[in-house]
Amino acid sequence: MLNSENFSSIGDFERQAIANLPPHLFTAWFGGPGHEHQAAIANRQAFERTRLVPRVLSGIGEQTLSTTVVGTRVELPVLLGAVGGQIRFHSDGEIGSSRAAAAAGTVFTLPTGAHFTIEEVADASSGPKWMQLYYLADDELNKLLVQRAEAAGFKALLVTVDNAGISSSERLARFYRGSRTIPWRNLTETIPGKVPASGDCFELVHRHVGWKDILRLRKYTSLPILVKGIQSVADAKLCVEHGLNGLIVSNHGGHALHSLRGTLDTLVDVVDAVGSQIEVLMDGGVRSGEDVLKALAAGARAVLIGRGLIWPLTAGGQEGVERALAILRTELSRAMRLSGVGNVAEVPRELLYLGR
């Protein structure tokens, strides 16, 4: 049983996750000696290099931590990102994470590689949910997944484009080692005859996906569409040009390529280029409420967390994730008050010293 009083920061959950997880699983997902994810380090360095320059005597009274993201109302600008294989970390899996998000009034993003089906998660949690999609080579499967999500009441479609079905076979081998539970149930129960013998449906992901493929999704759904994995101003401008509802600045938590910029640095450039034309979110490196405030000041509508979801899930299941979100809410509120900010939708860029 989790003693929530023992956890006062996201770092506390990381330390407990290290203690709880087999070493091969922890290093496969989060890095470790000999397996450091350099882009993940760059993400943290960008936040640590950036400083807050608060204003005083602002007379801030009641704070507003709620906002909307592509039409979805959230009570906290911290969304749970799409992390596959959650039952490997705790038996609560995606069901527990979705319920924790609902309790906090924020979005849960169901990964394509989930252990629970779209319908199971929809039935288990009343909170707002998004569907994450790896664009599959079989377009009929894309259509089926998207339309199932919309029918189940999901609020948006998040298409991950920075991995393109290409991942480290060595890392995946460590992740699946000793596992009797294979994710991707939304595929394995739908197309059992097409599932690879390994159970790893990354083999079904389209490796040559392009803008025309993303636009084809408009034929299948009326849901808002966000693209996750934007790492350049040029691609951000193409998101605007192609009429997407939102984009997520992300380098896949450092898993895809190692020699990448920190996402906070990229976020600043992207917002300066397109922020008035499209909703911009970010993930990568967020560990505290102060980090959230920095991202909001840089122009993000909200942030998504991955490690900040899985560490508390590992430590305490649904209760752990609820506690982590409560910590981030408290830290964000405190940072806003000390910085003279009353509304998460109105965080001034002048609050940041980028230290570039």
Image (tube, rainbow, N blue to C red):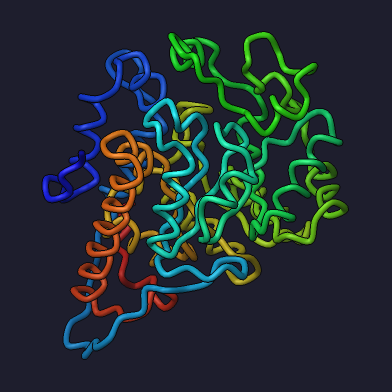
On the rendered structure, is 103 left or right of 176?
A: left
Q: Is residue 18 above or below residue 240?
A: above
On the rendered structure, is 350 left or right of 153?
A: left
> For residue 284, which quarter of the picture?
top left
Task: Please indicate, yes or no, whether residue 38 appears anywhere in the rendered image.
Answer: yes
Task: Please indicate, yes or no, whether residue 348 appears anywhere in the rendered image.
Answer: no
Q: Is residue 86 above or below residue 53?
A: above
> For residue 21, which quarter of the picture?
top left
On the rendered structure, is 266 left or right of 352?
A: right
Q: Position of residue 75 (x, y in %)?
A: 42, 70
Residue projecting furthest to the left: 6
**Nearest to the observer: residue 51 or residue 12:** 12
- Number of dots carrying numbers: 0
> For residue 198, which quarter of the picture?
top right
Q: Is residue 223 above or below residue 112?
A: below
Q: Position of residue 264 (x, y in %)?
A: 41, 51
**Nearest to the observer: residue 144 or residue 303:** 144
- What residue appears at the point 39 percent right and 70 percent down from the top-left corner? 349
Q: Position of residue 119 (x, y in %)?
A: 64, 46
Q: Is residue 223 above or below residue 310?
A: below
**Nearest to the observer: residue 206 or residue 117:** 117
Q: Position of residue 16 (x, y in %)?
A: 20, 32
- What residue appears at the point 45 percent right and 39 percent down from the top-left corner? 261
Quarter of the figure that contains the N terminus: top left
**Nearest to the observer: residue 210 or residue 183:** 183
- What residue appears at the point 48 percent right and 43 percent down from the top-left corner? 95
